[in-house]
Structures are given as C-alpha cells and as structure tokens.
Image (cartoon, rainbow, N blue to C red):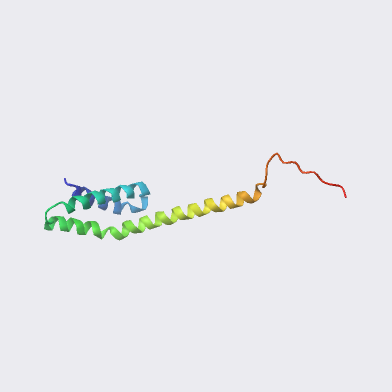
C-alpha cells in the first residue's frame, strides 16, 4: 500500500468521523498530505488510478476545511475568554506594592 492509498483511506475515515476529530488528527492528515504531495512531485506522470484516488481525497476537502475552521473559531473564543478573565482579575488587584504603608496627614 503506497502513501496515496494510506492518505485516501485516512481521509475517508476522517470524513466519516469529522465531528469527533480533534486538531491533532487533522495535523496528522496535513502532514500525510504534505508527504504524499512531495512523493507525487518526484514520480512519473500519474496513472488514471492515482488521479481517481486524488479526486476522492479532494471530494472530502470542504468537510475537512470546515472542521478546521470550526476548531480555529473555538480556540479563538477560548483565547478571548482568557483575555477577558485576565482583564477582570486585574481590576480587583491593587496597584503598587503589597507591603506599602500609607500615612494620613492632619490638617
């Protein structure tokens, strides 16, 4: 089984389980895609069978990119929540030194 076959099967399985996939699985897919692209560039012209496999892989592209975008948006929202929490926490923290002493003057 060559890398293109592995990529095709991995892509098809991932497309079926796309809602349960996390960023690590998608990162593995991207790494595998890069390996396959590099291998294909060094190969002789593609056979019709290889072209058909690539078409199948491309047919799942929109689903995979959609999931990546959803994960990106979730991460962005998480970062925004963290920043808001930090801002709220800062407003309760007293500025200056903890051991500072203030003296009142009598008028």
Asked whether residue 89 appears in the rendered view, the answer is yes
Instruction: Please report the residue visible at 27 percent of the width from the left and 50 percent of the height from the top.
Output: 13
70, above or below 1, in the image:
below
Report the quarter where the N terminus lies.
top left
**Count of marks placed on residues:** 0
* 103 left or right, relative to 41: right
* 62 left or right, relative to 103: left
**Residue 21: horizontal and vertical position, in percent?**
35, 49
Instruction: Please report the residue visible at 33 percent of the width from the left and 58 percent of the height from the top.
Output: 65
Asked whether residue 22 appears in the rendered view, the answer is no
Front residue of 64 and 72: 72
**Residue 100: horizontal and vertical position, in percent?**
72, 41
Front residue of 106 and 37: 106
**Residue 88: horizontal and vertical position, in percent?**
61, 52
* Residue found farthest to the top: 99
* Residue found farthest to the right: 107
Residue 53: name its quadrant.
Answer: bottom left
Instruction: Please report the residue visible at 16 percent of the width from the left and 58 percent of the height from the top.
Output: 51
* 81 left or right, relative to 67: right
Instruction: Please report the residue visible at 68 percent of the width from the left and 41 percent of the height from the top.
Output: 98
């Amino acid at each position: 089984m060559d890398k293109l076959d592995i990529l095709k099967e991995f892509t098809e399985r991932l497309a079926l389980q796309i809602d349960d996939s996390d960023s690590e699985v998608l990162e593995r897919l991207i790494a595998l895609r890069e390996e396959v692209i590099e291998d294909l560039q060094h190969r002789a012209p593609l056979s019709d069978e290889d072209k058909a496999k690539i078409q199948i892989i491309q047919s799942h592209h929109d689903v995979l990119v959609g999931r990546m975008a959803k994960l990106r948006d979730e991460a962005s929202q998480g970062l925004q929540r963290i920043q808001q929490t930090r801002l709220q926490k800062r407003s309760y923290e007293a500025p200056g030194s903890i051991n500072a002493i203030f003296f009142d003057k009598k008028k």
